[in-house]
Image (cartoon, rainbow, N blue to C red):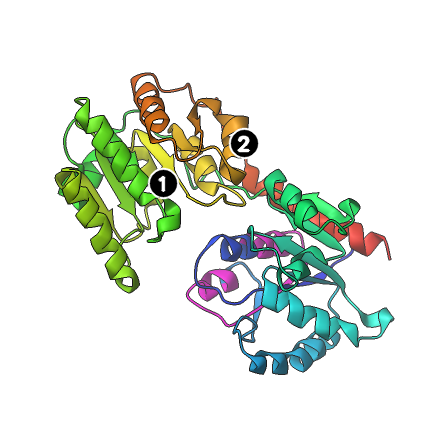
Amino acid sequence: MRRLTVVQLLPALESGGVERSTLEIAAALVAAGHRALVVSAGGRLLPALLATGAEHVALDLGRKSPLTLRHVGALRQLLLRERVDIVHARSRLPAWIARLALRRLPAAARPRFVTTVHGLNSPSRYSAVMASGERVICVSRTVRDYVLHHYPDTDPGRLRIVERGVDPAQFPRAPQPDPAARAWAAALHPALGGDGPLLLLPGRGTRLKGHADALQLLAGLRAIGLDARLWLPGARDPARAAYVAELQALAVRLRIAEAVAITPPTAAIARAYAASDLVLQLSRKPEAFGRTVLEALAVGRPLLGWDHGGVGELLHAWQPRGAVAPFDLAALQRSAHALLAQPPAPAVRMPDTLHAMQEATLAVYGELVRNP
């Protein structure tokens, strides 16, 4: 494939799965000898993006305001000036700006248009733009089914399933148990001490992540005699103080407050997985993908989650014993007890799903440039 210039569009570079995927594809493009540009409002991940060898252009394409339309002309000029081959939109408003910019370009100078559906957004004409790419990358089979169900006019031939990936080098296999990692966690958060099992639910502070279900699970396990502990990294957020207070009040009512650590995110998430005995993924709303599943399994920890969306899809593929009918707390407790008593044997080696994702995405670009 000839050297390409690829522009990825997203609102900002703060945090999250969309941003991480953007950096991963930028790195793959540069490594393969292509040119990677990212257009966004910037953010804390900008230094990491530039470290990959990619270039950044600052345009605030994600602000929900009529003023955002003023960026259509600037984007159109960028596409012409840089002789862009592929425009890859990863979010709805940037995708609309891209479509408007592409519309008035002469056919000979018009880049090919790719979208990635990262989430299960509410179906609407606004969201439909994510199904309008010449190639539409779906991050799971769940997403592909969702797109075809809600946008039945979409040509299935334009859809490509490219699952998100993790780098096993960043989530190395840890011994089970890992006393050093557990001691590290207990030193950070004394509530996590003790000899009983440690449950881990990483996720931002929102009800959608199922923190209350995790607290109910902990109460049930402690009621049957297990000295279980629960760590909720990411749940504590200064902007969501009321939600944190709600979780703390629930822990007090359940009489488990001394066994729970509700903390900000940890930069050492791989070590947090290693410290745990069971990882939870209890999102109350089906998710497009479940990166936590792959991260935990790479480290060698069993995972327990609600059997819906991308999480259920991954659990059935990698660890079926961890899939529980959504919101059945009694079944959740039974499965947790069984997994703690007899953990499933970890995979011999977790494949490099990140590299597979990068290669598959570049292959999608190649399809378009080889087929005018």
Q: Which residues are magenta?
A: 24-50
Secondary structure state at the residue bearing disc 2: loop
Tell me the residue that label 1 is attached to.
270
**Viewer-side residue, 244 vs 250:** 250
Determine whether, in the image, residue 67 is placed left or right of residue 338. Answer: right
Please name whichever residue, 94 or 47, is drawn nearer the observer in this view of the structure.
Answer: 94
Report which residue position mark 2 lands on. 351
Residue occupying the point 65% across, 72% down: 97
Q: CA distance from mark 2 to mark 1?
A: 17 Å
Q: How far across and how far down the image is residue 8, in percent?
A: 62, 63
From the viewer's perspective, is 169 left or right of 358?
Answer: left
Seen in the picture, residue 49 relative to 193 is either above or below; the reply is below
Q: Position of residue 254 (x, y in %)?
A: 17, 38
Name the amino acid type tagged 1: Ala
- Dot 1 alpha-carbon crowd within 10 angstroms: few under 14, some 14 to 19, many 20 or more: some
Inspect the magenta stretch and tell me whether residue 40 lies in it: yes
Seen in the picture, residue 326 relative to 370 is either above or below; the reply is above
Vertical comparison of 225 with 11: above or below: above
Three-letter amino acid code at disc 2?
Pro
Residue drawn at point x = 58 percent, y = 63 percent: 54
Q: Residue 323: x percent and y percent?
A: 45, 28
Q: Is residue 171 left or right of residue 309?
A: left
Q: Earlier in the sequence, mark 2 or mark 1?
A: 1
Tell me: 241 left or right of 144: left
